[in-house]
């Protein structure tokens, strides 16, 4: 059983047992490897007919992915989220996102129908 909270130092990391401010585990986040192509698709499955644009394959850490998602959401003027390394943007924003990510230097492909 791992220590999660200490009255001396507050919250601790369950992996390295250090205080959260001194944790070494989070600084070693793994960047997912892929084929170098960012794929943009549209999906409505499980969303009651509402479409979302999915962006997969961006080789960034979770923190950087959230920052990029925030910029893309502002560019599109819609909401969205990051789930399991996939950026979800509300609505069909594929054309705008292809142009924006290409401008940022990514190799972008439209995927799906």
Image (spheres, grey):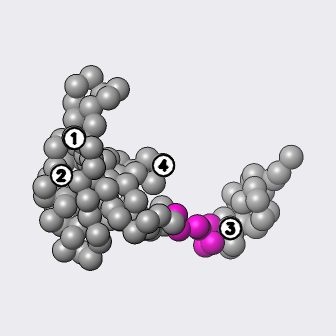
Give yes or no for contact between labels 3 and 1 (Cβ–Cβ under 8 Å): no
Looking at the rendered image, the disc whose residue lies closer to the viewer, 2 or 4, is 2
Which contiguous range is marked in magenta? 26-32
Point out which mark residue 84 bears: 4
Q: Are marks 2 and 1 in contact (CB under 8 Å)?
A: no
Residue designated by label 3: 25
Residue 19: x and y, percent? 72, 66
Q: Which label lies toward us, 3 or 2?
A: 2
- Distance between the Cα atoms at labels 1 and 4? 22 Å
Kindly state the secondary structure of the residue where label 2 is placed.
helix
Q: Is residue 37 left or right of residue 26?
A: left
Res 12 quadrant in image = bottom right
Count of numbered circles on the image: 4
Q: Residue at x 43, y 65 (%)?
A: 35
Distance between the Cα atoms at labels 2 and 1? 12 Å
Q: Residue at coordinates 26% horizontally, 64% vertically from top-left? A: 108
Between discs 2 and 1, the one toward the N terminus: 2
Asked whether disc 1 touches disc 4, contact meaning CB atoms under 8 Å apart, the reply is no
Q: Which residue carries the number 1 mark?
A: 113
Q: Nearer the viewer, mark 2 or mark 1?
A: 1
């Amino acid at each position: 059983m791992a220590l999660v909270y200490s009255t001396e130092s507050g919250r601790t990391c369950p992996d390295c047992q250090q205080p959260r401010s001194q944790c070494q585990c989070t600084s070693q986040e793994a960047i997912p490897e892929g084929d170098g192509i960012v794929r943009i698709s549209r999906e409505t499955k499980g969303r009651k007919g509402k479409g979302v644009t999915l962006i997969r394959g961006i080789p960034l850490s979770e923190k950087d992915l959230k920052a990029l998602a925030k910029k893309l959401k502002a560019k599109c003027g819609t909401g969205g989220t990051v789930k399991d390394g996939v950026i979800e943007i509300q609505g069909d924003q594929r054309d705008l996102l292809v142009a924006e990510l290409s401008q940022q230097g990514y190799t972008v492909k439209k995927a799906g129908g």
